């Protein structure tokens, strides 16, 4: 597989590479890439055939969008690339009145007022008049799904965005939006972007089946778990090793006994394959059901190349089984609902397979 093994994103006509380039590192002052390195990363990805670029309005205070837009403009790639950006987090750059200490609540969230504000800002920074894929960056827990959907559908009709999708939301939110859109015969979310890796498999309970059923492609973010699955952290001392050593969205949640056990299996298989740990972790997640394109980022060009090399890696069935077994979720109530035991109780002792379980079976005559 390579970056030019393009595929449709969900049930849509938007064609993307199997790896998306995340540009959160562009413009970041501490753990990011400087202008020259960001340019080299962008060039490596696009010259290798990659066409899926992912940024957000809050990355580096808008600098990521500005740099990304500059690179696209300089290389005259606007028609070639699938440009994705996001809205929802509050715009911290707003100037506050002298008598206020908190920000403008309407400069964040998924309400119509903020979506229009955020989009206009992104279009200017990206030096474009339309966005290919517009993400709701995070579910705000307040705005009715109907309002979010109506606003985004209106932007599709206006031509300012081509498609939209949801990130970091409960499965029911994306499912409800897709269901309403199907009934209205209007534009619907074509993908979900969620944390997914060998040490973060919770989406398999609700998000994965919901996405597959609704025709939404899954795009994992942090498939290397903030760098944990690269092997850069040592169990005895995790300080001064990378992003997870300091302030970060995960805290110390990745440094659990189970995760260290998972990492050890990744390390052994990487040794057997004579490849990096990162490539093993990426190859596993890219092979999971529903995954359309996997989001990768880099602060150095060499990191990106290592990630791209995972496209060529083929894990054996035995290696996939070992990785899946050591990282398996602890059983919960919802898992019992689809267990072989419950299935047999329902069907008089027969292990009946559903449509999704046998339609892709190579031995099927259908």
Image (cartoon, rainbow, N blue to C red):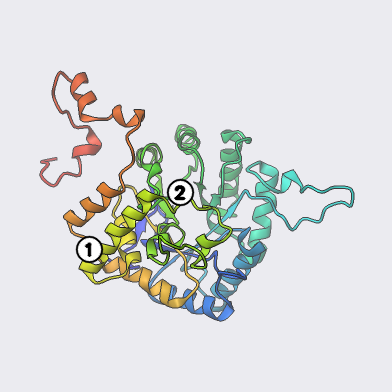
Spot occupied by residue 322 in the image (x, y as percentages of width and height): 22, 52
Of residues 133 and 235, the one nearer the viewer is 235
* Vertical relation: 1 (above or below) 265: below
Question: Closer to the N terminus: mark 2 or mark 1?
Answer: 2
According to the picture, the residue beneath numbered tag 1 turns out to be 314
Q: Quadrant of residue 110?
A: top right
Spot occupied by residue 124 in the image (x, y as percentages of width and height): 67, 64
Which residue occupies 60% across, 74% down? 70
Of residues 22 and 325, the one nearer the viewer is 325
* Apparent side of residue 70 relative to residue 271 in the rendered image (left or right): right
Name the quarter where the C terminus is drawn: top left
* Vertical relation: 145 (above or below) 114: above
Which residue occupies 31% across, 32% down? 335
Name the quarter where the N terminus is drawn: bottom left
Where disc 1 sits, the SS reads loop
Spot occupied by residue 14 in the image (x, y as percentages of width and height): 42, 56
Mark 1 crowd level (few <14, some 14–19, many ≥20, 10 Å Cα): some
Of residues 313 and 39, the one nearer the viewer is 313
Q: CA distance from mark 2 to mark 1?
A: 24 Å
The answer to whether residue 285 is seen in the rendering is: no
Mark 2 crowd level (few <14, some 14–19, many ≥20, 10 Å Cα): many
Where disc 2 sits, the SS reads strand
Q: Which mark is residue 194?
A: 2
Q: Which mark is residue 29?
A: none
Which residue occupies 47% across, 75% down? 300
* Vertical relation: 56 (above or below) 29: above
Spot occupied by residue 167 in the image (x, y as percentages of width and height): 51, 47
Q: Quadrant of residue 225?
A: bottom left
């Amino acid at each position: 597989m390579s970056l030019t093994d393009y595929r449709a994103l969900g049930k849509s006509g938007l064609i993307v590479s199997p790896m998306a380039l995340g540009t959160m590192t562009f413009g970041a002052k501490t753990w990011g890439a400087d202008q020259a390195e960001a340019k080299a990363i962008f060039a490596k990805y696009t010259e290798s055939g990659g066409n899926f670029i992912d940024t957000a309005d809050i990355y580096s205070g808008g600098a990521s969008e500005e740099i990304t837009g500059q690179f696209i403009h300089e290389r005259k790639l606007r028609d070639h690339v699938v440009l994705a950006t996001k809205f929802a987090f509050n715009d911290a750059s707003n100037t506050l009145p002298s008598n206020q200490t908190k920000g403008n609540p309407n400069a964040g969230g998924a309400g119509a007022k903020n979506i229009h504000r955020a989009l206009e800002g992104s279009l200017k920074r990206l030096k474009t008049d339309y966005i290919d894929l517009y993400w709701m960056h995070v579910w705000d827990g307040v705005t009715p799904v109907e309002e979010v959907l109506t606003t985004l559908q209106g932007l599709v009709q206006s031509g300012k965005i081509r498609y939209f999708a949801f990130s970091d939301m409960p499965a029911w939110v994306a499912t409800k939006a897709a269901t309403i859109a199907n009934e209205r015969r209007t534009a619907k979310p074509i993908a979900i972007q969620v944390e997914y890796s060998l040490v973060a498999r919770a989406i398999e309970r609700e998000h994965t089946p919901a996405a597959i059923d609704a025709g939404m492609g899954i795009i994992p973010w942090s498939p290397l778990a903030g760098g944990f699955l690269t092997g850069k952290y040592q169990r005895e001392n995790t300080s001064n090793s990378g992003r997870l050593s300091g302030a970060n969205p995960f805290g110390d949640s990745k440094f659990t006994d189970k995760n260290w056990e998972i990492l050890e299996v990744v390390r052994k298989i990487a040794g057997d394959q004579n490849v990096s740990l990162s490539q093993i972790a990426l190859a596993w997640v890219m092979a999971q059901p529903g995954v359309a394109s996997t989001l990768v980022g880099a602060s150095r060009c060499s990191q990106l190349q290592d990630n791209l090399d995972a496209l060529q890696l083929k894990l054996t069935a035995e290696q996939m089984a070992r990785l899946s077994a050591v990282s398996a979720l602890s059983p919960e109530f919802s898992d019992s609902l689809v267990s072989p035991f419950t299935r047999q109780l329902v069907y008089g002792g027969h292990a009946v397979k559903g449509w999704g379980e046998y339609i892709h079976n190579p031995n099927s005559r259908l």
